[in-house]
Image (tube, grey):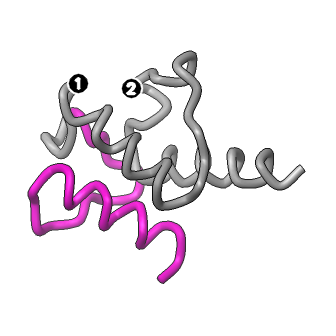
């Protein structure tokens, strides 16, 4: 399973939806996430990818789509490795 598929599974699990959003679809506008689900999703992302999301990054805009989450996670994984 690649990183994007892992993120999709996390989003579907947190949102309790069986469908998958498009990569650039707003997860908040489409009802996959809301401000209450965001911390749950962040916790799952941290666990799944072995990263720590600092409080300063807890901004819904950074996690508004699968594509944005994937970019963020990739950057954090690279940062962790250095």
Contact (CB < 8 A) between labels 1 and 2? yes
Position above or below: 10 against 72 = below
Extreme residue in the top direction: 56
Extreme residue in the right direction: 82
Front residue of this view, candidates 59 and 28:
59
Disc number placed over residue 35 in the picture, else none: 1
x, y percentage for residue 69? 49, 47
Cα separation between marks 1 and 2: 8 Å
Residue found 66% across the figure and 54% down from its top = 74
Position above or below: 56 against 17 = above
x, y percentage for residue 80? 77, 48
Indicate yes or no whether the magenta region holds residue 25. Answer: yes
x, y percentage for residue 29? 20, 34
Residue found 21% across the figure and 36% down from its top = 37
The region drawn magenta spans: 1-28
Residue found 53% across the figure and 69% down from its top = 3
Q: Quadrant of residue 72?
A: top right
Disc number placed over residue 8 in the picture, else none: none
x, y percentage for residue 5? 41, 72
Dot 1 alpha-carbon crowd within 10 angstroms: few under 14, some 14 to 19, many 20 or more: few
Residue found 23% across the figure and 34% down from its top = 28
Extreme residue in the bottom direction: 1
Indicate yes or no whether the magenta region holds residue 52. Answer: no
Horizontal side of 66 relative to 17 (left or right) equals right
Horizontal side of 35 relative to 8 (left or right) equals left
Looking at the image, is mark 1 or mark 2 earlier in the sequence? 1
Dot 2 falls on a residue whose secondary structure is helix
Dot 1 falls on a residue whose secondary structure is loop
Position above or below: 24 against 56 = below
Residue topped by disc 2: 60
Dot 2 alpha-carbon crowd within 10 angstroms: few under 14, some 14 to 19, many 20 or more: some
């Amino acid at each position: 399973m690649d990183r994007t598929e892992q993120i999709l599974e996390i989003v579907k699990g947190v949102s309790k939806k069986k469908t998958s959003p498009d990569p650039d679809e707003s997860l908040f506008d489409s009802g996959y996430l809301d401000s209450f689900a965001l911390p749950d999703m962040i916790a799952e992302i941290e666990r799944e990818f072995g990263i720590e999301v600092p409080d300063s990054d807890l901004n819904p805009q950074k996690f508004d789509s699968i594509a944005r989450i994937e970019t963020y996670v990739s950057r954090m994984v690279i940062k962790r490795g250095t």
